[in-house]
Image (cartoon, grey):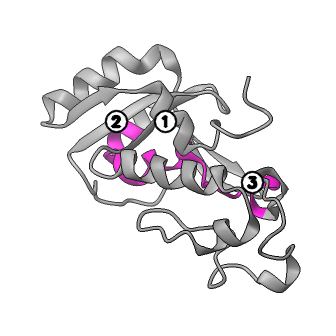
Amino acid sequence: MTTHPPTTRRLVYGHAQLHDCLAFANADTAAQEAEEIKAIAAARTWGQARTLRTTHVSNPVHPEDYDPDEDPADDEPFDINEVGSVMQGDWPPMVAGRALTLLPEDLQTRFGKQQFTALNGDLLEIPLSSEAELVDELRQRGYEVRRDDELINVLDGRSFSPLAG
């Protein structure tokens, strides 16, 4: 397991529906990330989607990140679920993977199980039953922790995914 020092002491967490586990995000940027994801998903045309500038997340159809010659013209209707990286589950990146950089390694080992996905990278599967003990441990270590299931699932793409239910 790769060791990464925690990047923040303020965390938001919740039940990530896709992997049915707890997931964590940086509370300092999570709301802005979610707004950027929703803005891209809400674009009405390919041109509108391509020109959206983001600060916290990559834009899967921005010309710097994606070849616009492979996509419909700017005035064509846009559907986020037709974007290759979205269909493959690569965008937005799995929120359940963030715990691997946000949580102290000893807590990752104690409460979670690192899972490898061939296409989408590693994630830390933390069972919902561990919530109270893990949150208590984080707070004892000086972390500010709050639960927001909706925000966590927006970060995971569940606000637009046809798999959301």
Q: Is residue 7 above or below residue 14?
A: below
Q: At label 2, which amino acid type do we have?
A: Val
Please provide percent x and percent y for residue 102.
Answer: 35, 49
Residue 11 vs residue 77, the one in the foreground: 77
Rendered image: mark on residue 80: 3
What range of the chain is rendered magenta? 85-108
> What label does residue 12 carry, if any?
2
Tell me if 13 is positioned left or right of 127 in this view.
left
In this image, 100 relative to 113: left or right?
Answer: left
Q: Quadrant of the C terminus?
A: top right
Q: CA distance from mark 3 to mark 2?
A: 26 Å
List the single residue furthest toward the front: 75
Q: Quadrant of residue 132?
A: top left
Residue 163, image x and y in percent? 79, 33
The amino acid type found where label 1 is placed reads Ile
Residue at 84% across, 56% down: 82
Q: Which mark is residue 39?
A: none
The disc placed on residue 152 is 1
Name the residue at 49% across, 71% down.
53
Q: Amino acid at mark 3?
A: Ile
- Contact (Cβ within 8 Å) of mark 3 with mark 1: no
Q: Helix or strand or loop: what does disc 1 sit on?
A: helix
Sequence-first disc among 3 and 2 = 2
